[in-house]
Amino acid sequence: QVQLVESGGGLVQAGGSLRLSCAASGSIFSINAMGWYRQAPGKQRELVATITSGGSTMYANSVKGRFTISRDNAKNTVYQQMNSLKPEDTAVYYCQVVVTTSPYTQNNYWGQGTQVTVSS
């Protein structure tokens, strides 16, 4: 079994910054892609950013230039630095990690979610 623990959410004023973390632990053979999603009230969950095992990144247009995703493979942790936050960034943020738990078994795992609230 694999567990993901998120941290770093909170309340911040518009223009402020937050850094999210998501640490994976458990029966991990290797970690492949890692990413962040968010879900605002009344809206569908949307992709925010992803990072491959090789370090290639992809961002939603709405966060390009403001958010930065990174990972520490030694710590099985993915981060998201969020700068110049806007009220429309308010959402519950979830990390997703693609984990290989054995040579032939790969699954997606989700964090518990962390609330980010940006006040105007």
Image (spheres, grey):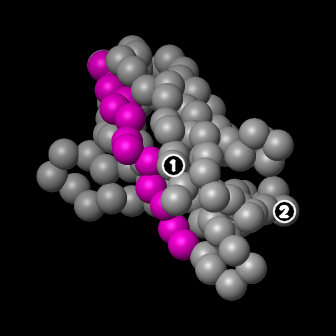
Q: Which residues are magenta?
A: 107-119
Place residue 71 in its image quadrant: top right
- Give how far apart the Cα atoms at labels 2 and 1 are: 22 Å
Residue 52 in sight from this viewpoint: no
Residue, x 74% and y 64% (percent of image)?
29
Classify mark 2: residues with Cα within 10 Å, few (<14), some (14-19) or many (20+).
few
Residue 72 on the magenta segment: no
Label 1 residue SS: strand
Q: Earlier in the sequence, mark 2 or mark 1?
A: 1
Please state, as top left, top right, bottom left or bottom right, where the C terminus lies in the image: top left
Specify the amino acid type for callout 2: Gly
Mark 2 or mark 1, whichever is nearer to me: 1
Percent coordinates x, y for residue 92 in the rendering: 33, 41
User: Dot 1 corresponds to which residue?
Assistant: 3
Query: As rendered, which of 57 and 74 lies closer to the eye?
Result: 74
Residue 118 on the magenta segment: yes
User: Dot 2 corresponds to which residue?
Assistant: 54
